[in-house]
C-alpha cells in the first residue's frame, strides 16, 4: 500500500506594512508640540472653561473653533492605568512599564503615556507623577520620554500662554508601521508554488463550478470550500485597465504604463497585471495577452499581446 503524500507546507513570511503620513499642523497643535520641545505643556480652554490636554482645535461640545492656550503643570495624577509586562519594538520604554492616563495639574482631561515604575505593585490610581523629559527634543509627543513617580503637592492651575515660540514646528511625519507574520493559507500557497513553476492554478467551486484565480479557499457566492485545482491560461483577455502616470517609490518602471484586469482562459475571476510590449495608448479592452517571465522570477513580470484577434465583448463582459 502506497502511503499518502504529505500536503505541501503552508507558506509563512514576515511582512511589514508601513505608511509614513506627513501632515501640517494648525496653530494649536503647532504650539503644543513646539512647547514640548521647550519643556512647556500647553492645553486649550474650551467654551465652558475646561482645559483639555492634549489640546484640540474644536470644542467637543459646541464644535466651535477654540484658540485660548494655557500652560499646565508638568506634574499630575494617575487616573487609571494598565501594566505592560512585555514592551514591543517602538514603544516608549524597553523595560516593563504602565500605560497610564495622567491628569496634569491645571488640566481637566488626562493624557495617555508611559509610566516608568519597578512593577505593577508600585502603581496605583491617584499616585502623583511628573514628566520625564527626553534628553533630545524635536517637537513631538516623544519629547515626553515618560512619566515617573513624584512625591509632591499639586501645582497651581493653568495660566494663559500666547503659544509663541521661536522656530515653531509646523509639520510632522507620523510613521505608521505594522510588523507581522503573514500566511496566505492552503489555497494561495498552492497558487504561489505553481507560479514558481510558471503555471497558474485556480480552484473550482463544486457547486457553481466557477474557477477562481487567485483562489480564495471558498466560493464567495456559494460559501463552500473550493478544493479542486484547475490550471488556467496562460493567455488571457484584458477586461479593463488604467494608465498609471505617477511613478511609485522603489518601482523601476517608467511612466506612463498600463495596469489591467486580465481574465485568464478558463478562469471566472480577473486578476491584475502590468501590460508591456505595446504602447500604453494602444492597450484596449479585449486585447489578448500572455505572461512574460524574467529569469528566476516567481511570478509573471508583465503581460504582452499574443497577436491574436481581440476577444469579443460578450466573451468577457461578465468579468469586468
Image (spheres, grey):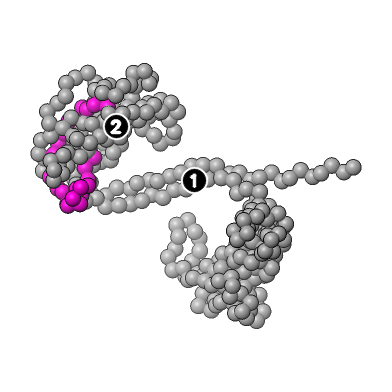
Circle 2 is placed at which residue position? Answer: 101
Above or below — where is 5 with respect to 219?
above
Quadrant of the snapshot with the C terminus: bottom right
**Span highlighted in magenta in the image:** 54-78
Above or below — where is 126 with respect to 91?
above
162 vs 170, left or right, is left
* Disc ID at residue 16: 1
Residue count near mark 1 (Cα–Cα under 10 Å), binned few <14, some 14–19, many ≥20: few
Q: Residue at x 66, y 66 (%)?
A: 267
Instruction: Measuring from the top left, give residue 122's x and y in whole percent.
Output: 34, 18
Residue count near mark 2 (Cα–Cα under 10 Å), binned few <14, some 14–19, many ≥20: many
Q: Main secondary structure of the magenta part?
A: loop
163 vs 252, left or right, is left
Q: Residue at x 35, y 30 (%)?
A: 99
Quadrant in the picture for residue 163: top left
Whichever of labels 1 and 2 marks the residue nearer the N terminus, that label is 1
Q: Nearer the viewer, mark 1 or mark 2?
A: 2
Residue toward you, 303 or 285: 285
Q: Is residue 269 located in the magenta-colored stretch of the structure?
A: no
Instruction: Measuring from the top left, give residue 211's x and y in whole percent.
Output: 67, 63
Q: Is residue 63 located in the magenta-colored stretch of the structure?
A: yes
224 vs 70, left or right, is right
Q: Residue at x 21, y 31 (%)?
A: 104
Instruction: Measuring from the top left, give residue 308's x and y in whole percent.
Output: 67, 79
Amino acid at each position: 500500500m502506497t502511503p499518502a503524500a504529505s500536503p505541501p507546507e503552508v507558506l509563512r513570511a514576515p511582512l511589514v506594512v508601513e505608511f509614513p503620513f506627513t501632515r501640517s499642523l494648525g496653530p494649536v497643535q503647532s504650539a503644543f508640540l513646539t512647547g514640548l520641545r521647550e519643556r512647556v505643556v500647553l492645553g486649550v480652554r474650551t467654551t465652558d472653561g475646561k482645559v483639555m490636554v492634549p489640546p484640540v482645535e474644536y470644542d467637543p461640545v459646541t464644535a466651535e473653533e477654540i484658540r485660548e492656550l494655557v500652560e499646565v503643570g508638568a506634574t499630575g495624577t494617575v487616573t487609571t492605568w494598565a501594566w505592560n509586562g512585555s514592551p514591543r519594538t517602538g514603544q516608549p520604554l524597553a523595560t516593563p512599564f504602565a500605560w497610564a492616563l495622567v491628569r496634569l495639574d491645571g488640566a481637566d482631561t488626562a493624557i495617555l503615556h508611559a509610566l516608568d515604575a519597578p512593577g505593577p505593585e508600585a502603581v496605583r490610581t491617584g499616585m502623583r507623577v511628573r514628566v520625564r523629559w527626553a534628553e533630545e527634543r524635536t517637537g513631538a509627543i516623544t519629547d515626553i520620554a515618560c512619566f515617573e513617580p513624584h512625591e509632591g503637592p499639586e501645582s497651581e492651575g493653568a495660566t494663559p500662554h500666547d503659544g509663541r515660540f521661536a522656530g515653531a514646528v509646523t509639520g510632522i511625519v507620523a510613521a505608521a508601521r505594522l510588523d507581522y507574520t503573514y500566511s496566505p493559507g492552503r489555497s494561495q500557497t498552492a497558487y504561489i508554488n505553481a507560479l514558481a513553476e510558471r503555471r497558474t492554478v485556480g480552484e473550482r467551486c463544486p457547486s457553481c463550478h466557477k474557477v477562481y484565480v487567485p483562489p480564495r479557499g471558498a466560493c464567495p457566492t456559494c460559501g463552500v470550500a473550493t478544493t479542486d485545482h484547475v490550471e488556467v491560461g496562460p493567455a488571457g483577455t484584458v477586461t479593463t485597465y488604467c494608465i498609471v502616470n505617477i511613478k511609485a517609490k522603489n518601482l523601476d518602471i517608467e511612466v506612463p504604463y498600463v495596469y489591467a484586469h486580465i481574465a485568464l482562459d478558463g478562469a471566472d475571476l480577473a486578476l491584475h497585471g502590468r501590460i508591456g510590449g505595446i504602447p500604453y495608448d494602444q492597450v484596449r479592452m479585449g486585447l489578448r495577452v500572455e505572461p512574460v517571465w524574467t529569469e528566476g522570477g516567481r511570478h509573471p513580470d508583465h503581460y504582452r499581446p499574443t497577436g491574436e484577434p481581440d476577444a469579443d465583448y460578450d466573451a468577457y463582459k461578465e468579468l469586468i
